[in-house]
Amino acid sequence: MKLFPIRGGIHPDYRKETTCEKAIVAMPMPSALHIPLQQHIGAPAEALVKAGDTVKKGQLIARSQGAISAPQHAPTSGTVVAVTDETAPHPSGLPQATIVIEPDGKDEWAELPAPIADPFAADAQTIANRVAESGIVGMGGAAFPSAVKLNLGSRHKLDTLLLNGAECEPYLSCDDRVMREHADEVIDGARIMAHALGTPNIVIGIEQNKPQAIEAMTKAAATFSNVTVVGVPVQYPMGSERHLVQAITGRETPARKLTADIGVVVHNVATARAVQQAVRFGRPLLGRVVTVGGGAMREPMNVDTLVGTRVSDLINFCGGFASQPARMVNGGPMMGQPLPSLEVPVVKGMSGILALTAAETNEHPVQACIRCGTCVTICPCGLVPVEMAAFIRKDHLDVAAKLGVMDCVSCGSCSWICPSHIPLVHYFNYAKGMLNAQDREKRKNDRVKTASEAHTLRLEKAAEAKRAADAARKAALNKSTPATSEEASA
Amino acid sequence: MSIVTSKSGPFTHAASSVQKTMTLVLLALAPATLFNLYLFGWPAILLFIVTVGACVAVEAGALSLGGRPVKSTLLDGSAVLTGWLLVMSLPPWAPWWVGVLAAVFAVGLAKHAFGGIGQNVFNPAMVGRTVLLISFPVVMTAWVAPHPLFSADAPSLMDAFSITFGGNMPDAMSAASALGHVKTELSRGIPVSESMAQVPNLFDMAVGYRAGSMGETSALLILAGGLFLMARKVISWHIPFTLMATVFLMGTLFNAVNPERFASGLFHLMSGATFLGAFFIATDYVTSPVSKLGQIVFAVGCGIMVWIIRTFAGYPEGMAFAVLFMNALTPIIDQYTRPRLFGRTRKGEPLPLKGDN
Amino acid sequence: MLLAVGSLAVMGVALGGILGAAARFLAVEENPLEEELKAMLPGSQCGQCGFVGCGQAAAALARGEAPVTLCPPGGKAVVEALAKKLGVTADLSEHEEKLPEHAYIIEDLCIGCTRCIRECSVDAILGANKLMHAVITDVCHGCKKCVPVCPTDAIIMKPIEVTVGTWHWSKPEAAQPVVH
């Protein structure tokens, strides 16, 4: 299959070898599970249980609210200990509503929705609904509710379902292992999704540094003529949705549009497996494979973990730390977020937990920019990081916006390569946050203005109505007692 | 354990640093420098030490005046590199004060008056050289023919002290550089086609066995250093190749029109500071554009200016002026040569969808 | 010489006259600046600036009779926008940057008198006579006009909380080389 070049990119040390050759290990039941109500992009779920309730495995414990949201399910049977605010696995470390469940050890299933007997005979809405009620979100890291992306077929003319198995982030090998060990489930899930989307073609893009995954997937896909497995060049950030679409189809997604607008929908390989489980067996998304890695981990490996497992329990399961980690990362080292604490739960979008040594993070004090221009050369989005960062440093956010800071995908390539160790992506994250906050404020001001105008209008109308009522009453009075009125007028 | 979340990702970094870049450039310059130090003997070695030392001293002084960390900034190697490039552009037997004065203008004026490393608009080494060339044209154009170390007529260390620190430049030893010779002859009415007969042949020019500043001679070793930098991805082909191609094309084109008046493209390519300028001066990160397209525009501009200055202006060599002139245009080149954003047209509008118009 | 001086003088007088006449006869009736300034203000007519409403405040700003820091609910963003428009430097040292706030009604203290509802210029308070009132925080813009009218001091101002959804990275520390 002919591939297309993508702009820029880098070649970091992949460091996947410590985990990618070991089979996925299932983690034993932890002593408590902490399930945050928001593990996805969109509105948080609404808790349906309270302290003291008993729950069964797979039971709905929080329902989705609004069009973009996802429900949560009990990962095992047990008792709800509390519904309370706990530290979120988010760089802010802010509290977030969380359901705490104490497992009873029986792991008893609740009554699950019936499997969809023949998914290829079912209509798109049935499949999308099943995916929505199973709480499936994008498992590549963004955690966007998957059902929303399965409904795109009704509004867009789609030709390709692209399954993202690039896994271009260093250290991470959870997708690699899932593809090697569960290739049939992934392919089945992809075919179900393609059926729901109405796309004739399925392309599975896997970086060429995972030959065993490519082989396993090719074998599993051999019987289906519409499924193609493609080895894509090893080039970070190949796993970025838009860049993978460009590499495989040659189509460039216009800014502020979706890949669906150019006929392609992208899903992660682990998501495809979760869809398969939900459709074929009625099982909601209760766990995921997490890569526990980094030089400071004693036994790095891929762990099949229940959602809600504390990161500290997960680390203990992997033998604890071999040395004091310099950084704890949620996700890959390039786009991952710092972990605010080890006492946070594993969530659906968490692809990795990395304990990195100082040698691995290679942090240095910031030096002055020498304008080497490497950041410009490697930016996969065609931005000029050096210039944007200079404007942001002086808080000229409007200029940075004009230069395209909102188009930055925060892939981290520029920060990674900068010889002066300037935290370029941090500047852009700051600018994006500020611009979003300004936008929110502006929208609120508009709301306030509208409300104020409505208020004024209402008062005027009320006054008008009162005047009219007074006049009417007066007129009525005049009619009933003409004499009085004549006297008055006289 | 304490977890620091004050920093956003990425949490890994390439093995790149400013020091590493500067060291690679110095390494690339080393073969040509060593050969030239050998070629021009003790006076050149003394001038080299004086100039580089002066640059480092001025840098240290400026840093401590500005209240900035002295040691860590000096260790980035940029002052050494500036001094090194500066001395490569001076006549090898120039007196010590030329090196010191040039260092003051290069590091003090061109670099630190603008805010230190990364902030300067003009290439520091070229500012140092140009100020000296304009102020002391005689001293700055007193070239000598090569006197290799340990050869019969090479000055001893004692002679060298007298040349560099005593200002006793032996007149009989001076020689004209090739470019200077052609220009002088032309001004006397002798056409280029005739004066070319007296300049060293192209092979000698390539190896470096000729009069000139240290960096002007020995094109081959400079080329080797440049290719090394390209191999290590410190510089890309865009500036050197475009610059040299432009100089060559301009030379060839006009030589074809009037060989009596204009020197050939090959002569332009091999003489003067074309190689040093193309690989080490014009490629200076700070003062050249950041995008590849910008670098090409910049290099074409440099090439044209070099040819114009060499051919029509009062000075025989124009690399320094050409680079400084284009340095001034770098900000505006940067502004007009930004890459196209992903998913957007050159104008910054989102790409049209098929079906839209 | 004289001719040159003379012709330039004549041209100057003539062009000046035309400009003067144009300024008088083609003058825009309403001050466009005033409209633009009004658009920048929150438009909730809260009156905290001392003027009756945002329109009057904009007029005063346009005449240069009011400081750009006059609008408390607008915050730093409005100050900067006004300063940029009027070409003045905003003196933010006087301007105490407060985190955005919203009104909050303490349920136990509310007696349902509806006075705050009548005071609110954006209809952000829900409730009826003898019924507990509540503030819609999404619409409330923190003008504080409801606070003094409450007979039981049941209304307090609370900062709008940063959530996981609204949090963002702060600016990285200045890129100055660290002293070894």
Image (cartoon, coloured by chain):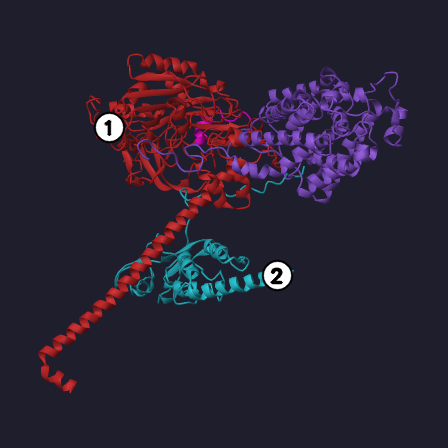
Chain colours: A red, B purple, C cyan
Is residue A325 in view from this perspective?
no
Which image quarter holds the C terminus of chain A?
A: bottom left
Q: Mark 2 lies on which chain?
A: C
Q: Which x, y percent locates residue C168?
A: 46, 42
**Residue nearest the observer in this picture, A106 or A367:** A367
Q: Where does the magenta region start and end?
A: A311-325
Q: What element carries label 1?
A: helix
Within 10 Å of disc 1 (Cα), the crowding (few <14, some 14-19, many 20+) is many
Q: How far apart are marks 1 and 2 (CA)?
A: 91 Å
Quick check: B343 left or right of A126?
right
Mark 1 lies on residue? A127
Q: In which quarter of the image is residue A163?
A: top left
Mark 2 lies on residue? C3
- Verify whether residue C75 appears in magenta: no
Q: Residue at x 56, y 63 (%)?
A: C10
Residue A99: give its label.
none
Is residue A229 in view from this perspective?
yes
